Amino acid sequence: MKYMLLMLGSEADWDAMAGGTDDQGRAWSPEDVKALVEHMQRLNDELESRGELVDAQGLAAPSRTRTVRVVDGVRQVSDGPYGESKEVLAGYWVVDVESEERALEIAARASAAPGPGGSVDEGIVEVRPIMETAGGQEM
């Protein structure tokens, strides 16, 4: 069964990793960022070796996001993610696992990524099944 695991973050998280501070006043050192990347790479390597990884990507800062909709037949583009959002999509994994329990286990490992100073960041990860059509195709 395929699941999408969605890692959430905030604009302040990207600011902190780029030399500013997050909404708790914490800054990320280059070593902190390196530890985060290494944590995610180890997780990706394990998922790949188990044949569970379909895709995984980190996303650019929310400030680079554009939201598009059509109103009265005219395309409207606005800066940033969804209006009034505190948490935004930071990255994702698509995994093909045998059970929801395994997807939840992977999400917990992603959530326990190191933060500034090596603290466990306790990020939020949404776990969503990928729907299948009657013919067995995901939609």
Image (tube, grey):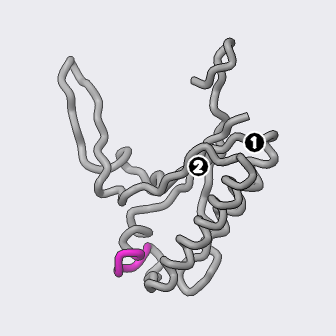
The residue wearing badge 1 is 97
- Picture coordinates of residue 35 (x, y %)? 56, 78
Residue 135: image quadrant is: top right
Q: Amino acid at mark 1?
A: Val
Q: Identify the disc placed on residue 93.
A: 2
Q: Nearer the viewer, residue 134 or 47?
A: 47
Residue numbers of the magenta segment: 16-22
Q: Amino acid at mark 2?
A: Trp
At horizontal 42% and vertical 51% (from top left) the residue drawn is: 85
Residue 61: image quadrant is: bottom left
- Residue 28 in the magenta stretch? The answer is no
- Picture coordinates of residue 27 (x, y %)? 43, 83
Q: Is residue 137 above or below residue 62?
A: above
Q: Residues within 10 Å of mark 1 (few under 14, many from 20)?
A: some
Q: Nearer the viewer, residue 93 or 16?
A: 93
At horizontal 43% and vertical 75% (from top left) the residue drawn is: 22
Badge count: 2
